[in-house]
Image (cartoon, coloured by chain):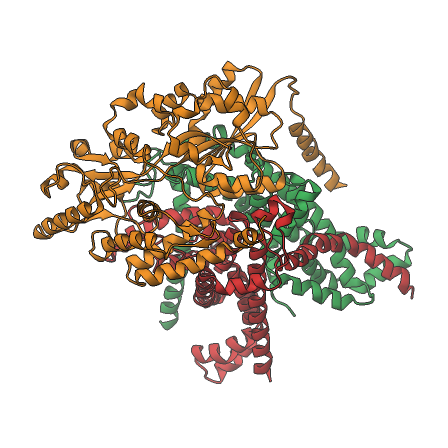
Chain colours: A orange, B green, C red
Amino acid sequence: MNRLRAITPVLLLLAGISCGPQQERVTVLKFWGFGNEGEMVQPLIREFERMHPDIRVEVQQIPWTAAHEKLLTAYAGGSTPDVCQLGNTWIPEFTVLNALEPLDRFAGASATLQLDDIFPGVLRTNIIDSALYGVPWYVDTRVVYYRKDILQQAGYEEFPATWSGVLKASEAIQRSAAAKKKVAYPFFLPTNEWVPAIALGMQSGGNFLKNSGANGNFSGPEFTRAFTLLSEFYAKRYSPSGMQLITNLYNSFSDGVIVMYITGPWNIGEFTRRIPPHQQKLWMTAPLPSMDSLTPGISLPLGTSLVMFRESRHKEAAWKLIEYLSSVETSVRFYGMTGNLPPRRSAWRDSALASNVYAAAFYRQLQRVDPLPQIPEWEQIVIRLQTYVEYVATGTLAVPEALRRFDGEVDVILEKRRWMVENAR
Amino acid sequence: MKRRTMSLLLNSGLFLIGLTTLAPVLWMLSASFMPSGEAGTFPPPLFPSAPTLEHYAALTERLSMMRYFLNSFIIAGSVTVVSTLLNSMAGFAFAKYQFAGRDRLFGALLSGMVVPAQVTMLPLFLMMKEMGFVNTYVGAVIPGMASIFGIFLIRQFVSAIPDSLIEAARIDGGSEFRIYRTVILPLCKPILLTLALFTFMGTWNDFMWPLIIMTDQSNYTLQVGLANLMGEHVLDLELMMAGSVVTIIPVLALFLVFQKHYVRGIMVGGVKE
Amino acid sequence: MNAAPRAAAAWIFLSPALAVIGIFFVLPVLAAFALSFTDFDIYALGNWDYFRFVGFQNYVRIFETPLFWTALRNTFYFVLAGGPLSVAVSLGTALMLHSKLARFRTFYRTVFFLPVVSSLIAVAIIWRYLYHPAHGLLNYALSFAGIGPVDWLGDTAVAMPAIIVMAVWKNFGYNMLIFLAGLQNIPDDLYEAAHLDGASGWQQFRSITLPMLKPTTVFVVMITVIGYFQLFAEPYVMTQGGPLNSTTSIVYLMYEQGFRWWSMGFAAAIAFVLFAIILAFTLVQMLLQRSVKR
């Protein structure tokens, strides 16, 4: 009896929570935002709601570390949102699941969305089997950040256009640092990042996989060339071979302990904030060097797209949200708030971006990006690659052996895909 | 003389261990009141220079901590009520009834405790999906509605109740359920309280199952919400500490008040005869 | 003696709990076992045509996966280093608290138990900050002893030890209470008799305390080992299995494979391999105990 009396208020509370005030004729959209964007997008969403009084948007913020699991659990549990942002390397996975709504019909009828205004390489990452599954929201690529002054002292007025140039510059920097009895790592390549290795691989010709993406081809000539070049940086101590030596990137950069580093657009803001004011004139960005002399070298089309889930019951309203968030004005505004780069070229011409000296390298780089293999296993594969970068960086394995073993792992990961290809499904 | 040095050594040792044990918790409490950015300075401060409640305010206003608190409370409360009932009935049956296969069944149940819980989580999730309980309170509560450890605890305790009491009640002409209600339950109050405490605290602190079953942020429990917060605000030390305090305090308070019962439960359960 | 209706009543009392355990525990375990013989993954999730029974392929694949061996090594490291450490600390504090010379016993008992009741997430968060290489309290304290800043969670050599220390801190109170109960069960006159015989404190400890504590010790070791094999939440919150997979445990690997990469058949196989390992360990322990008794 006592227990029943104890439960009753709880039950009443439960009932009260589940019955909210009913809102007729207002469409409620569920939007999932990840990471920083999840928080930053809220004012934009409020503006969207003002423009569309019959649509309300519930925003859910999820950290990137949990985003992948949450999305798949939602899919399995049948509770996907209407719209969410999706890293464009994840689009192949969700297409395989048949979870995403193709957007061609919406894009075709749209007045504001001009697909050919988007950087072609980035747009291609959203197209699977000739259907459009996402609209790029912001783009990300990787360029080199470097200390202008230190490079000048080593005799380079412009950033080297080729990797052999970079190696020579690194040697010069290292020599001059040694002469001053200082420690310097001319080119910082953290061993927990797969991007430099893959970028080099693409510049060497790609071909990461063979047999229609059913086997790994990392021990093939192209990636071997790329990985060997990468290993040279570690062997010659141009880059530290462990994680623990650089605890604070920005301090190391301003101390000249690191001179060059491949990273993404968010660091424009970070460098501006964290490098001391008197050193602000000393750093600059440049597109990636290339293997031959076709400048700039190819980089990766990363970034985030807005996608719509097939199970959404408010597709028209969901499209309006996508259209709004990806419009030129909104992406310019978003850039102002977050430093995230707009995917539409006209946005770059008309705004503060046009005069941002650091962003210029990104603009040039984005013209030279090629999509990665669009298979669901890709992310799993590149995360394993990090382990092999470390093996090679620490000298535990020689390049050919490392790549042979890595291909072995890749083949195991791709076993299912191989079966599917062989059975021609 | 020797006795005094022994005593000194022993008690200083205890003090040091106590300090080491408490230090992280105390620092957490202190940092939660520090203004933003202060806890991360060097050298690390031990006390807030200007104590502030801003992080607690942020947690409740901006970051839905009250919602998570409510979810945790509802789920832990429901599990506690249901499982205490179910476990006590089963424990009573194992202790005081003779039936075919009783000991073998009990042994089989005990051996189930060796199975790591994570093994069940994948199929359980798929099962919940089929039943439509993903992202619901029901889904979060169901797996906890009975527990092998709870049955074991009750059984140990009830075994010690003299059979004569039960026989007397039977002679008086009571149904079995009436015996359970009027004889067993009142005598079991101490262990029931202990079990309820164990269950509430265990469910409150549970992390993995709520993480998997709740897909909507508004349904997160405190633990999941806290882990989520960590992913976002990892640089916001003071806020994270405040979040941790909120997560720990309720269960800590419960423990401090009901210590005796909780400790007794471990000793009953731990010293197997 | 009315045995039959009594037995029926017993089953009525048992059935709700048994039903819950049967449906929501036993059934999932069996289902997981079945799942481990299939290749249920992201492709199968999207389309049942891509679902296969693959026999022991998953289990074979486990042994072909280098990351599994890393996880196995890490888990054994955690169990074999952390287990004895945890038991030793628990026994040590229990002995200290049990001593007649100890003061403020209840207070200390409460304090030592605090970490046990605190939520693991909150504890992991606090310790993550304590371990910070530049601003953490631990390195600050160590700097007074002249020990340079250690990147506890970023250096592959110390990350697992860091997690072990935290796990021991969190759990020692629980086993301490069990040891205390065991110690309290040892009759005082045994010690008095030994004292009269002229035995030293250390001799008393070795010939009375330790042997009388054996069943308790065996129990504590068993539950600690079983618990430690299931290491998951600490790496999940503190290190995400890193740095460079040095804190990836078997359960963490299972979670990643199952919930991140959605290779559920493969993940289920990993879970059962873990179960087999724990079972083997438990059986070995029980056999050892029985043979020593003889």
Q: Quadrant of residue C163?
A: bottom left
Q: Position of residue B150 (x, y in %)?
A: 67, 56
Number of marks drawn: 0
Q: Is residue A221 left or right of residue C4?
A: left
**In the orientation shown, which residue stands out farthest toward the left?**
A179
Q: Up-down: is A355 above or below A60?
A: above
The residue sitting at 30% across, 54% down in the picture is A227
Looking at the image, can residue C180 be seen? no
Quarter of the image that includes the N terminus of chain B: bottom left
Q: Is residue C11 left or right of residue B261?
A: right
The residue sitting at 56% across, 19% down in the picture is A55
Q: Position of residue B32 (x, y in %)?
A: 40, 38
Looking at the image, can residue A127 be seen? yes
Q: Up-down: is A344 above or below B217?
A: above
In this view of the protein, which residue sits in the foreground, A249 or B40? A249
Q: Position of residue B252 (x, y in %)?
A: 52, 46
In this view of the protein, which residue sits in the foreground, A248 or A141? A141
The residue sitting at 7% across, 52% down in the picture is A179
Q: Up-down: is B219 above or below B24?
A: above
Q: Is residue A50 left or right of residue A300?
A: right
Q: Position of residue B102 (x, y in %)?
A: 78, 66
Quarter of the image that includes the C terminus of chain B: bottom right
Q: Up-down: is A238 above or below C200?
A: above
